[in-house]
Image (cartoon, rainbow, N blue to C red):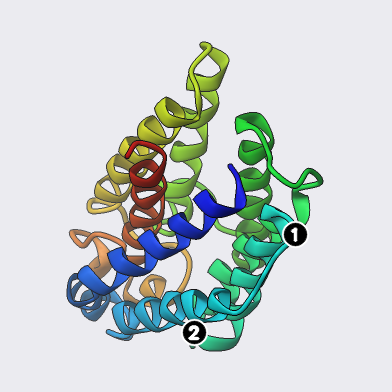
Amino acid sequence: MDIALTRQWVQAVAEAMDEHKDRLTQLDAAIGDADHGANMNRGFSAAVTALDTFEPESVGQLLTKVGNTLISSIGGASGPLYGSAFRAAGKALTTPEPDAAEFLAALRAGLAAIQAMGAAVLGDKTIVDAYAPALDAFAEELGAGGDLAHAAARAAKAADDGAHATIPLQARKGRASYLGPRSIGHQDPGATSTALIFEALAKVVNP
């Protein structure tokens, strides 16, 4: 991952959030505050704008900038969660242009930040249900000798599968958990937006 490719990733995420904002809002209307689509669209649009005038010296600096922007521009729980993930990923990178294994380690730092903040685990019907399987698939592909493009593609598929797998779950964390059994039968909006982030990554590394 170099700086130019990482910029393209953030741009692709922003485009995906804009394209899917109504769907994310509909999902959140069922089990949340009905603002997830608007919040994610606003946050990543702000991140793209912030990067327009920012000249980072490394991928880590760029991701940290994105994280800080998300925290300051997204309301509710999403800003701190996604912002902390990107910021933690950025701070975990010690080389200007990380290889696939270093990038995976940064993504793992992002997941750790989310879990430290929200205390969610697999099966809680949250971001983690898409993020954790994505990292497992990414790591498995690298372990089998695959490159970044193949690892990102597998991660995107795993994240999407993970998001769909939240439908039959009862939420145990976040606002949706207040609904108890009524949260069953609805796809988690956070897991869905997480899948969009990994799909955007796959898109830019597999042009």
Q: What secondary structure is marked by label 2?
A: loop
Dividing the image into 4 quarters, which one contains the C terminus? top left
- Report if the CB atoms under discs 1 and 2 are less than 8 Å apart: no
Vertical placement of residue 13 versus 143, above or below: below
**Residue mark closest to the camera, 1 vs 2:** 1
Q: Residue at the spot x=63%, y=61% of the render? A: 63
Q: Is residue 194 left or right of residue 38?
A: right
Q: Residue at the spot x=53%, y=12% of the render? A: 145
Q: Disc count in the image?
A: 2
Q: Which of 127 and 193 is in front in this view?
A: 193
Q: In which quarter of the image is residue 38?
A: bottom left
Q: Residue at the spot x=37%, y=41% of the render? A: 202
Q: How crowded is mark 2: few (under 14 residues within 10 Å), some or many (20 or more)?
A: many
Q: Which of 51 and 39 is in front in this view?
A: 51
Q: Which residue is identified by label 2? A: 74
Q: Position of residue 122 (x, y in %)?
A: 48, 46
Q: Earlier in the sequence, mark 1 or mark 2?
A: 1
Residue 57's label in the rendered image is 1
Q: Position of residue 71 (x, y in %)?
A: 60, 80
Q: Position of residue 165 (x, y in %)?
A: 28, 45
Outermost residue toward the right?
Answer: 94
Vertical placement of residue 59 versus 51, above or below: above
Q: Is residue 81 left or right of residue 129?
A: right
Q: In this view, does 99 lie to the left or right of 164?
A: right
Q: Which of 54 and 134 is in front in this view?
A: 54
Vertical placement of residue 153 versus 34, above or below: above
Q: What secondary structure is marked by label 1?
A: loop
